[in-house]
Image (spheres, helix red, strand yellow):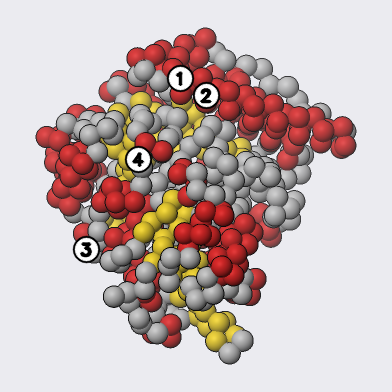
Amino acid sequence: MPLKTLFLNPPSFENFDGGASSRWPATREIESYWYPVWLAYPAGLLEGSRLLDAPPHHVSADETIQICKDYEFLVLFTSTVGWEGDQRLAEAIKAANPAIRIAFVGPPVTTSPDKALNECQVLDFICRREFDYSVVEFAQGKPLNEILGISYRENGKVVHNPDRPQIEDLDAMPWATKIYKRDMDVTRYNVPFLLHPYISLYSTRGCPAQCTFCLWPQTLSGHAWRKRSTDDVAAELKWAKENFPEVKEFFFDDDTFNIQKQRTIELCEKLKPLKLTWSCTSRVTTDRDTLKAMKDAGCRLLIVGFESGDPQILKNIKKGATVERARAFAKDCNDLGLVVHGDFILGLPGETKESIQNTINFAKSLDVETIQVSIAHAYPGTEFFDYAEKNGFITNEDAMSDAGGHQMAHIEYPGLPKEYVLEMVHKFYDAYYFRPKAAFRVIWKAVINRDVPRLYVEAKAFLKLRGQRMQMVKDAKKLQGKTPDAVSA
């Protein structure tokens, strides 16, 4: 029998969705929880294992420590923002169960394995990039020096084994949804713009796009795009529909679900008979024919990274898309009846007060269903981090978040104070949602989806955080005498 293994998305900040499958590790403005899809695969490969997703199940650190007393091997998915707390948790787990073996996986240990191993002495090893088979081999008894893709300490020195080739045969992996059924309560997962309850899964890994800021392809999944067979994906969705009758929506959490037209249309033909409601990520380069095939197969919503409405910034971040193409894409979606959730980022390379206003105006002109406005974070391991560090734009690498895990501006360009960017996040939201058309749309959708109680809770949470952040901005202005320009709605 393999080592009795616990796969852990650790307890962290309240409402923190930034663990095992969140590309932007943070506590959101509104409570959100994404599924720990990455941990589900090795959990499905190891007999007797358990996947514990602590944040949405509200499992405390003390409870986690007690649970770990019953296990021989712990695999913890860590994040840049959660690293300090995860390290302290691992030390407490080791103190309570000295015999347990501990491995960390995730972006920060991939990019800085030496730092991780030297700072956290209770780690037996860390995995770089994809970790599925590395942790399984250890649990099955393979010696550390024979396991590809890991780093560990030996005789006081850090040893880096050769890289592990990326997994090509994704059909050989277990179905994540079966682990959800075994170990998790799907009603605990909430994302404001998805129907509740929802389930997320992957149909591909990797992303060939070169966006300089994006954490996942540069640290974990890689740029090589690998796909499951459409038969395997359809079979899993059929099984999930039968086993989760309460689920209202299935979400493909791929880095880029529909990047290949032929494969997307083929998959849609196999999803159509299942009569599912589903959503996915999408790039604005997706053409109308592909979008129509998706809509006909039950697709309801697309999460789209528009990022900026300024053409130069799109070039700076190597987005591989234009403002004009984004407008055409949004029009196609609207014509076809596809809902769009648009993601925007303030503080990307080249950002100015004028470009921020351009992005706000651009978002209003697109008039998509819902938006999310993030603060640009330069995560170690990304091209954006290297650029910001080289030019001295990182004001404090350790101040990516506040005490509650919420994103804080930590990049400052000449003429663009970080307090200004922080304030503009909320002015962006105000300018977008306080329009009568947008406000009515949100309320009406909550009514027809019978989600009014959820909307009330989300609105309270957002307004509370908004007030806290605006107070931070006011305090910073008093200290520094900086007054951001007003933005009209």
Residue 240 at x, y percent in the picture: 22, 43
* Residue 166 place in picture, x, y as percent: 34, 67
State the residue at coordinates (50%, 44%): 58
**Residue nearest the viewer, comparing 391 with 370:** 370
Q: Earlier in the sequence, mark 3 or mark 1?
A: 3
Dividing the image into 4 quarters, which one contains the C terminus?
top right
Which label sits on residue 457?
A: 2
**At 63% from the left edge and 62% from the top edge, which residue is drawn?**
88
Give the Cα distance between marks 2 and 4.
Answer: 19 Å
Amino acid, disc 2: Val
Q: From the viewer's perspective, is residue 268 above or below residue 448?
A: below
Q: Secondary structure at mark 3?
A: helix
CB within 8 Å, label 3 to label 4: no
As drawn, the label of residue 186 is 4
- Depth order, front residue of 317/58: 58
Q: Are marks 1 and 2 in contact (CB under 8 Å)?
A: yes
Secondary structure at numbered mark 4: helix
In the rendered structure, which disc, 3 or 4, sits on the residue that comes first in sequence? 3
Amino acid carrying label 1: it is: Pro
Q: CA distance from mark 3 to mark 2?
A: 41 Å
Q: Comparing marks 3 and 1, which lies closer to the viewer? A: 1
Circle 1 Cα neighbour tier, 10 Å, few/some/many (<14 / 14–19 / ≥20):
few
Q: Which residue is mark 3?
A: 172
> How far apart in space, not on screen, are marks 1 and 2 (Cα)?
6 Å
- Name the foreground residue: 337 vs 408: 408
User: Residue, x 36% and y 73% (percent of image)?
Assistant: 3
Q: Reading the chain from its start, which is encountered first: label 2 or label 4?
A: 4
**Structural crowding at the residue carrying mark 2, measured as other residues with C-alpha within 10 Å and reported as few (<14), some (14–19) or many (≥20):** few
* Amino acid type at mark 3: Ala
Q: Quadrant of residue 407?
A: top right
Calculate the distance from the C-alpha at mark 1 to the C-alpha at mark 4. Answer: 19 Å
